[in-house]
Image (cartoon, grey):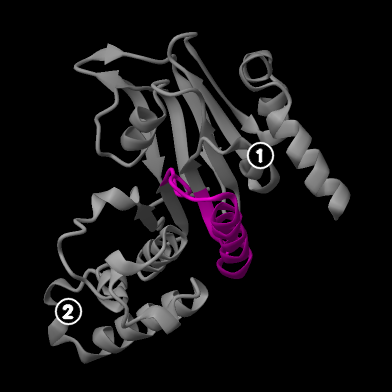
Amino acid sequence: MLIEVENLVVGYQKTPILPAVSFAVEEGEVWGIIGPNGSGKSTLLKTLLGLLPPISGKVKLNANTRLGYVAQRHALDPAIPSRVVDVVTGGVELGWSFLNPTHILKSRERIQSAMVDADVLKLKDRQFNELSEGQKQRVLLARALASDPQMIVLDEPTSAMDQTAERQVFELLGELRKKRGLAVLLVSHHLPVLGEFATHAIYVDSDEQVMIPGDIETVCHCNECVTRYGDALHRHRHTEECNH
């Protein structure tokens, strides 16, 4: 178990915005946080990451769990020129480790491996702000991979992308999950593709006061999700399973 959530209540200034939720993320699982705009998805994500204190309940990380975080792309200042390799290198926290040659060597190896796995090695000397949206997302994935995480958390990783680039990002996440045994937790509005790749989901709606976690089949068939999205999740998941 990488992360365990027990009776977690999220909100601001001691005011809950959603009911309590409990779930656990295991190695290799892909969890999608879904729901309408303004439903509390980002609040839940920030609380899971420790950026917001919970109103009540607990978020427990396994003592050995290493997290990699991929923020939305606008979090990087486009006015600051950075090469791809510099952005990826930022995923390795060196601290005083420059005094340790062994650590430096391992860090370089992780950076190289991350760029290879995210398919951005050929872009390493390009300026980040000159890349396409899909390329930028792969670079930020490589940055997260450079910390050698067991779980990657992504905030709307395919926003501002066309359908082709969106699918390529999800396919890359699927490959990384298999190759590295990664767990993935992401906020997404793109249900058709998410329905194909996710193993689990959390449906969030602060207006209706619901928070429903579970395996993808359970969540996509719950009344609240069907009312909001119809069979968007289930239809595309079924199509993908038939194709295999």
Residue 1: where, in percent of width, then height? 53, 48
Q: Is residue 210 above or below residue 30?
A: above
164 lies left or right of 20: right
The residue at 57%/63% (across/down) is 172
| Residue 199 in sight in this render | no
Name the residue tied to disc 2: 97
Name the kind of residue labelled 1 in the image.
Pro
Q: Nearer the viewer, residue 145 or 130?
A: 130
Residue 238: where, in percent of width, then height? 81, 39
Q: Quadrant of residue 10?
A: top left
Q: Quadrant of residue 225?
A: top right
Q: In this view, does 13 lie above or below 70?
A: above
Q: How far apart are marks 1 and 2 (CA)?
A: 44 Å
Residue 62: where, in percent of width, then height? 42, 49
5 lies left or right of 25: left
As for residue 145 lying within the magenta part, the answer is: no
